[in-house]
């Protein structure tokens, strides 16, 4: 295996299941690898807001002068996006020896694609001399491969219904799984304003240092600026985070709580906080692309995230027609998604996605038709996200709005190197 593509193809063939939650196998291989971090580790779990939280932590810490490493999944366009070192995606060639090291260490142990790649990327990060490691949980928390690393500070973002086949049927069950990343005696930041009781109960049971939104830290502000207050420290006159959306303020509040909790080992300046929040970037999170028609990209793919997307779309103002490109995995609960955002969408473009886990476009169309009550709305089938986007652009007037949302495959399908392939109608027509 001479290329990253070779290794990724190899990883796909090693285990009978795509997802097989549990830490025994991956921990045994990690022990044989000698995987360890000689720096503070921040682990982030939650249903929504994980990626944004990691990005804000990274931006602030980098502006404070720290060498950062960030692990997250899935990627939008290129696998290498899953590991950022000092703010840049890792080079494919740099990963090859770490994949080889995992292959030797695993012996006859069967690892899933996620487990194998996670170990390789963590091994690469640990060897790169980072001064702080930021780890995003893939699925759940308690049994996710990332949880083999003990967090010096754990952050739990918003919790809602998603991946219920694996995590349980309600917020209490899901919250318990997320709380598995907490550690005794260490900071446990809960930025969900109304967390499940299971999260609080587990934090108290193990003796974690619990920081709760609305109790141990809070936010206030107006249309121009906002402020944060926590245990013995305040920030005032802050510019709103560069990541758009009202929900980002809650994520930012958790970020500042985590950094305050880690102040003894990771001191930062107020200027690093201000600059870091103002400069943070993360493609695909209510990303608005300038041009005509307006283009919005968002990886919202469950009811809670789509509700936030709908609120953000409402706040954008009036557009004569809103077009939506939508593709999603087959395990998603579509009813609340269509119920919440349906009134805002005039023309749907349902797309197939290049993974067997995705819901076929025809199924999405049928599900939408079964609960659609708008006689003036329409739905179209498309073979790929790019075909769907092109169809939307062909139909849209310059004053309209196009929203591309759903799976990472959907948003990633219209991105190239982090930038939209088609930014406006006139770009397509002039090509």
Image (cartoon, rainbow, N blue to C red):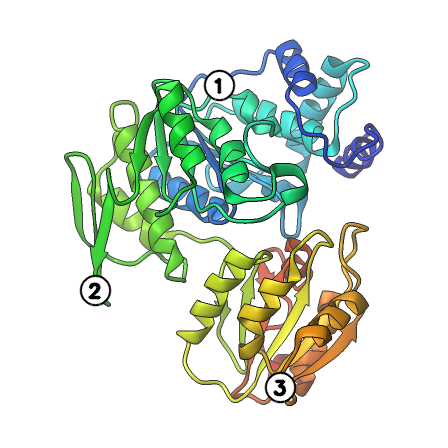
What element does badge 1 sit on?
loop
Q: Is residue 260 left or right of residue 99?
A: left
* Dots 1, 3 in contact, CB < 8 A: no
- Mark 1–mark 3 Cα distance, whole angstroms, equals 51 Å
Q: Is residue 135 shown to the viewer in this render? A: no
Q: Which residue corresponds to mark 1?
A: 37
Q: Is residue 344 left or right of residue 351?
A: left
Q: Which residue corresponds to mark 2?
A: 222
User: Residue 98: percent from the left, percent from the top?
Assistant: 67, 23
User: Residue 279: percent from the left, percent from the top?
Assistant: 36, 53
Tell me the mark number nearer the camera, choosing from 2 and 3: 2
* Residue 84 circle label: none
Quadrant location of residue 66?
top left
What element does badge 2 sit on?
loop
When the figure is inspected, residue 281 is found, relative to residue 268, above or below; the finding is below
- Disc nearer the start of the sequence (1/2): 1
**Crowd rating for badge 2 (residues with CA inside 10 Å; few <14, some 14–19, many 20+):** few
Q: Which residue corresponds to mark 3?
A: 396
Q: Which is more toward the observer, 231 or 8? A: 231
Residue in view at x 56 percent, y 86 percent: 321
Quadrant in which the C terminus appears: bottom right
- Disc nearer the start of the sequence (2/3): 2
When the figure is inspected, residue 42 is found, relative to residue 243, above or below; the finding is above
When the figure is inspected, residue 181 is found, relative to residue 230, above or below; the finding is above
Residue in view at x 46 percent, y 72 percent: 313
Quadrant in which the N terminus appears: top right
Quadrant location of residue 214?
top left
Residue in view at x 53 percent, y 69 percent: 340
Tell me the mark number nearer the camera, choosing from 1 and 2: 2
User: Residue 419: percent from the left, percent from the top?
Assistant: 57, 61
What element does badge 3 sit on?
loop
- Mark 1–mark 2 Cα distance, whole angstroms, equals 41 Å
């Amino acid at each position: 295996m001479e290329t990253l593509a070779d290794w990724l193809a190899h990883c796909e063939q090693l285990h009978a299941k795509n997802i097989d939650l549990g830490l025994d196998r991956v921990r045994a291989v990690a022990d044989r690898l000698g995987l360890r971090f000689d720096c503070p580790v921040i682990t982030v779990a939650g249903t929504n807001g994980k990626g944004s939280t990691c990005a804000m932590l990274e931006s602030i810490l980098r502006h404070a002068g720290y060498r950062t490493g960030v692990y997250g999944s899935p990627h939008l366009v290129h696998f290498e996006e899953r590991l950022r070192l000092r703010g840049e995606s890792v080079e494919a060639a740099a990963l090859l020896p770490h994949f080889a090291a995992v292959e030797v260490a695993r012996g006859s142990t069967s690892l899933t694609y996620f487990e194998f790649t996670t170990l390789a990327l963590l091994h690469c990060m640990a060897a790169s001399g980072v001064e702080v490691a930021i780890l995003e949980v893939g699925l759940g928390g308690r049994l996710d491969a990332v949880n083999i690393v003990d967090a010096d500070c754990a952050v739990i973002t918003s919790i809602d219904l998603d991946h219920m086949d694996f995590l349980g049927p309600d917020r209490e069950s899901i919250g318990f799984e997320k709380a598995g990343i907490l550690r005794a005696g260490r900071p446990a930041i809960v930025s969900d304003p109304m967390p499940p009781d299971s999260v609080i109960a587990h934090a108290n049971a193990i003796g974690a240092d619990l920081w709760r939104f609305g109790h141990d830290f809070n936010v206030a502000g107006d249309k121009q600026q906002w402020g944060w207050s926590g245990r013995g420290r305040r920030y005032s006159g802050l510019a709103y985070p560069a990541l758009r959306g009202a929900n980002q303020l809650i994520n930012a509040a958790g970020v500042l709580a985590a950094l305050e909790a880690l102040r003894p080992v990771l001191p930062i300046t107020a200027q690093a906080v201000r600059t870091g929040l103002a400069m943070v970037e993360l493609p695909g999170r209510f990303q608005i692309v300038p041009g005509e028609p307006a283009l919005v990209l968002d990886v919202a793919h469950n009811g809670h995230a789509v509700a936030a997307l709908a609120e953000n779309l409402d706040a954008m103002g009036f557009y004569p027609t809103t077009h939506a490109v939508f593709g999603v995995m087959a395990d998603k609960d579509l009813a609340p998604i269509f119920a919440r955002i349906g009134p805002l969408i005039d023309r749907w473009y349902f797309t197939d996605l290049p993974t067997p886990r995705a819901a076929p476009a025809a199924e999405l169309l049928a599900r939408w038709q079964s609960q659609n009550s708008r006689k003036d709305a329409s739905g179209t089938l498309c073979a790929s996200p790019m075909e769907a986007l092109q169809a939307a652009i062909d139909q849209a007037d310059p004053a309209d709005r196009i929203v591309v949302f759903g799976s990472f495959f959907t948003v990633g399908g219209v991105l190239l190197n982090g930038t939209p392939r088609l930014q406006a109608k006139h770009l397509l027509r002039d090509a």
